[in-house]
Image (cartoon, rainbow, N blue to C red):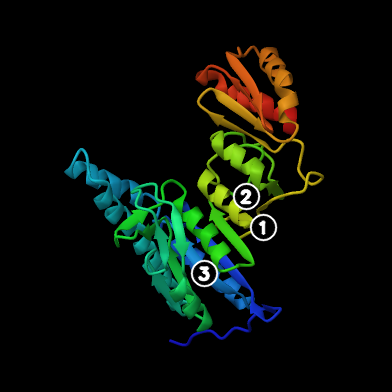
């Protein structure tokens, strides 16, 4: 099979590098997996080096977890991690196969083959060191490394997993270690919205968002980006771009914004009966939030304001109506 030749995009003597992370919903079937490979090839044709980071195919992790608990009511953490990591490894191999079928040389790598070293907390491991030797070697040869997200290896040589959002954390850590020029997170939504568009269809897509605001929204229940990956991005100065898995549109750039750039209000998140408003002006909107609920006949059982956020607590059965009312008032 003939492999594609690409002219490399170089700035200051360094090849431009993009990290592309694909979640489980973006790899849920063969067609979506091929589409992910096509997005990678498209980036290569622009002259950029690419490292792909992949989650397990949609549903695979839950199936593995269910299988483990069908064997034992209390599976040991080490063995759970050994089992759970196989989902991402399968995705990485399949994506590498898909890339090769498109004429792009690729190399699937597990977390430990990628040089991702962690502590020994099974199920919630923290990355301690990232050497990325084989990744760098592959890039130097024009090969796309396809890295299994969510996993690493500890000092004993045991497989570890990074917990919820672990593949996002892998992508951010690699972006920092490799000094990548961009880190694109592909999901089943087109970017970050002022509220979950599956709950609030009128939610507005944000062109840019502050990393701190997104972290607060994550703490409040938003699940587009997980807290640990955002904490890593803040700590290591990594900018993220959240994009739809179809590759259409620019999505949302997540970075540390200056105070003059930050929107007064960034978004709403809901967990149970609690609805949280996030943004630098959010604390001063607390009384307004209570008034909006009252005007819609929705009782507020509790409320509080904190750093760049404010929340109201209502009956969970009325939370959807409360979310819609608050979103309409503050964002439409």
Which percent across, then down, holds residue 39?
Answer: 55, 67
Q: Which residue is mark 3?
A: 51
Find out whether the residues at labels 2 and 1 contact each other: C-beta distance under 8 Å: yes
Say which label, 2 or 1, has the lower sequence index: 2
- Give the percent coordinates (x, y) of residue 82: 28, 56
- Which of the two marks, 2 or 3, is nearer to us in this view? 3
Image quadrant occupied by the N terminus = bottom left
Q: Say which quadrant the C terminus sits in.
A: top right
Tag 3's secondary structure?
A: strand
- Secondary-structure class at tag 1: loop
**216 in relation to 246, above or below:** above
Q: Which residue is mark 2?
A: 191
**Is residue 198 visible from the viewing direction of this image?**
no
**Mark nearer the viewer, 3 or 1:** 3
- Tell me which numbered mark, 2 or 3, is placed earlier along the sequence: 3
Read off the residue under disc 1: 249
Residue neighbourhood size for the residue with mark 2, other residues' Cα within 10 Å, grouped as few (<14), some (14–19), many (≥20): many
Residue at disc 2, secondary structure: loop
Question: Which label belongs to residue 12?
Answer: none
Is residue 221 shown above or below 148? Answer: above
The quarter holding residue 186 reads bottom right
At 52% from the left and 59% from the top, the residue drawn is 173
In three-dimensional space, the C-alpha distance between marks 3 and 1, rounded to whole angstroms, equals: 21 Å
- Give whichever of 242, 287 is nearer the camera: 287
Q: Residue 201 in the image: x percent, y percent?
A: 62, 37
User: Can residue 144 be seen in this snapshot?
Assistant: yes
């Amino acid at each position: 099979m003939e492999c594609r030749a690409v002219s490399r995009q170089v700035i200051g003597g360094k090849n431009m590098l993009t990290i592309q992370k694909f979640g489980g919903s973006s790899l849920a079937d063969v067609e979506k997996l091929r589409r992910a490979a096509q997005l990678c090839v498209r980036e290569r044709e622009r002259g950029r080096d690419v490292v792909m980071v992949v989650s397990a195919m949609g549903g695979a992790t839950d199936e593995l977890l269910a299988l483990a608990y069908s064997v034992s009511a209390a599976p040991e953490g080490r063995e759970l991690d050994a089992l759970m990591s196989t989902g991402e490894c399968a995705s990485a191999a399949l994506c590498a196969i898909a890339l090769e079928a498109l004429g792009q040389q690729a190399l699937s790598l597990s977390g430990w083959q990628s040089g991702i070293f962690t502590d020994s907390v099974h199920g919630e491991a923290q990355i301690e060191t990232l050497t990325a030797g084989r990744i760098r070697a592959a890039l130097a040869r024009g090969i796309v490394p396809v890295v299994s997200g969510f996993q690493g290896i500890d000092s004993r040589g045991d497989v570890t997993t990074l917990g919820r959002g672990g593949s996002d954390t892998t992508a951010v850590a690699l972006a920092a270690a490799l000094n990548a020029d961009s880190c694109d997170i592909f999901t089943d939504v087109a970017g970050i919205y002022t509220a979950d568009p599956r709950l609030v269809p009128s939610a507005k897509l944000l062109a840019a968002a502050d990393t701190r605001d997104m972290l607060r929204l994550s703490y409040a229940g938003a699940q587009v980006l997980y807290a640990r990956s955002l904490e890593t991005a803040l700590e290591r100065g990594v900018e993220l771009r959240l994009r739809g898995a179809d590759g259409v549109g620019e999505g949302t750039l997540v970075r540390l914004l200056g105070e003059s750039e930050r929107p007064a209000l960034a978004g709403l998140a809901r967990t149970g009966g609690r609805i949280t408003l996030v943004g630098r002006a959010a604390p001063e909107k607390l009384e307004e939030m209570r008034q909006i609920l009252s005007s819609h006949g929705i009782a507020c059982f509790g409320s509080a304001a904190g750093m760049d956020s404010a929340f109201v607590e209502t009956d969970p059965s009325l939370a959807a109506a409360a979310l819609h009312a608050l979103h309409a008032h503050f964002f439409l």
